[in-house]
């Protein structure tokens, strides 16, 4: 981020913090790492009194995502044995909508994972598999209570409730596709969005009977924190702004992809097996119809490449043209699998 952008961000965050905590001085702001969502800015906050927090601001002035995350954090804290950061302050209707939370409990999974590097089949490998089983159990705990209908989360009137814009699951899924389009950073493969929409529309009957559960929607390593102990609260998820009520199979497919897979290659099968084993331990099995719907969700997941192809170019340090060709081939293969 250049100096002018950082200054503008800091002013926006400072304004939100002044509104949320009048009279409480801020010592400094800290970067929290790269984000592929340009619609938000999130910074670490160190108050002058030593307290710490994280402040997320919707820089596009759209409070929808803030309202959703606020509702879900309060709901999960009240209704699920899954740890989440405490809400310290929030205003989805502010000129710059904001959410301030306390630090996440535990250590970021990404850091723990990297510390366990080593030779394949060694102790670090076994410990990584154990971590993934814990993630699987946490997702199963989150998905345990089923809702009567699918829907987009629009807010909450009480901590133990979620207000839903109810709709058939294929329509909710299509809405998440449009949300990805909104936050995507590249139009280079814009036709992939149309291909995904066509795939969902063509498979409405296969999707319509899916169960309805609360989904996190962004199960990536930086969004998971490992706590002491091994209960259902052993992994604490953060960053719930993409949460919705939908098919738990979709959350599982996305979790495997974000945690383990590369641009167009799958991670070690033993790791995926550990993730699913943990889920089965808690849930008694995978979501009904998982195998039938999985190929559709793998097509949808391609938008995590296509819509951010410029970011992947930087991350992988490869030419754009080469990654575009690989993305085209991968999308074709996934559509063929459906």
Image (cartoon, rainbow, N blue to C red):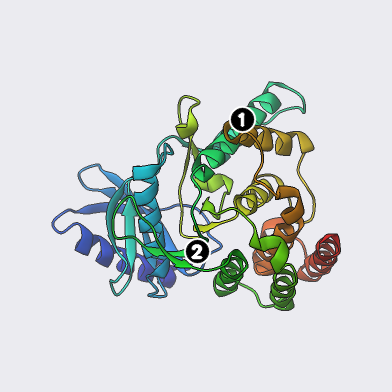
Q: Relative to residue 331, is residue 186 drawn left or right?
A: left
Task: Tell me where residue 119 appears, x and y as whole percent.
Answer: 76, 27
> Could you tell me which residue is drawn at 70 percent across and 49 percent down?
290
Q: CA distance from mark 1 to mark 2?
A: 27 Å
Task: Tell me where residue 105 appears, x and y as whole percent.
Answer: 40, 37
Neighbour tally class for label 2: few under 14, some 14-19, many 20 plus, Cα within 10 Å:
many
Q: Quadrant of residue 95?
A: bottom left
Identify the element where label 1 is drawn. helix
Identify the element where label 2 is drawn. strand
Q: Is residue 281 above or below residue 36?
A: above
Q: Which residue is mark 2?
A: 151
Check whether the beta carbons of the residues at disc 1 and disc 2 lie within 8 A of each other.
no
Q: Relative to residue 319, is residue 2 drawn left or right?
A: left
Task: Tell me where residue 11 appears, x and y as whole percent.
Answer: 31, 68
Residue 312 visible from this viewpoint? no
Q: Is residue 337 above or below residue 64?
A: above
Q: In front: 73, or 37?
A: 73
Tell me the number on the disc at residue 281.
1
Q: Which callout, 1 or 2, points at the residue further toward the start of the chain?
A: 2
Q: Quadrant of residue 83?
A: top left
> Could you tell me which residue is drawn at 42 percent across and 75 percent down?
60
Residue 133 visible from this viewpoint? yes
Neighbour tally class for label 1: few under 14, some 14-19, many 20 plus, Cα within 10 Å:
some
């Amino acid at each position: 981020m250049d100096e002018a952008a950082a200054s503008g961000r800091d002013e926006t965050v400072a304004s939100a913090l002044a509104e949320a905590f009048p009279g409480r001085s801020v010592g400094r702001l800290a970067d929290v790492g790269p984000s592929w969502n340009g619609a938000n800015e999130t910074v670490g906050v160190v108050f002058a009194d030593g307290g710490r927090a994280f402040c997320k601001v919707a820089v596009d002035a759209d409070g929808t995502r803030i309202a959703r995350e606020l509702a879900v954090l309060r709901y999960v804290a009240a209704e699920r044995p899954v740890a989440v950061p405490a809400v310290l302050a929030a205003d989805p209707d502010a000129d710059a909508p904001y959410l301030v939370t306390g630090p996440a409990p535990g250590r970021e999974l990404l850091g723990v994972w990297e510390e366990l590097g080593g030779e394949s089949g060694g102790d670090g490998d076994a410990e990584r598999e154990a971590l993934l089983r814990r993630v699987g159990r946490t997702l199963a705990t989150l998905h345990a209570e089923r809702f009567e209908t699918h829907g987009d989360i629009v807010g909450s009137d009480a901590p133990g409730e979620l207000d839903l814009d109810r709709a058939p699951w294929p329509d909710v899924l299509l809405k998440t596709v449009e949300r990805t389009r909104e936050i995507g950073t590249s139009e280079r493969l814009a036709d992939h969005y149309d291909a995904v929409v066509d795939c969902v529309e063509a498979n409405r009957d296969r999707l319509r009977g899916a169960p309805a559960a609360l989904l996190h929607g962004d199960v990536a390593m930086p969004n998971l924190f490992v706590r002491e102990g091994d209960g259902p609260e052993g992994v604490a998820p953060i960053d719930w702004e993409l949460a919705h009520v939908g098919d738990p199979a979709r959350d599982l497919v996305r979790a495997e992809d974000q945690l383990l897979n590369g641009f167009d290659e799958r991670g070690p099968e033993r790791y995926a097996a550990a993730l699913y084993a943990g889920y089965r331990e808690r849930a008694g099995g995978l979501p009904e119809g998982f195998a039938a719907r999985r190929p559709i969700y793998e097509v949808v997941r391609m938008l995590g490449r296509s819509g951010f192809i410029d970011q992947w170019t930087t991350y992988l340090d490869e030419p754009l043209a080469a990654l575009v060709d690989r993305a085209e081939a991968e999308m074709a293969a996934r559509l063929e699998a459906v």
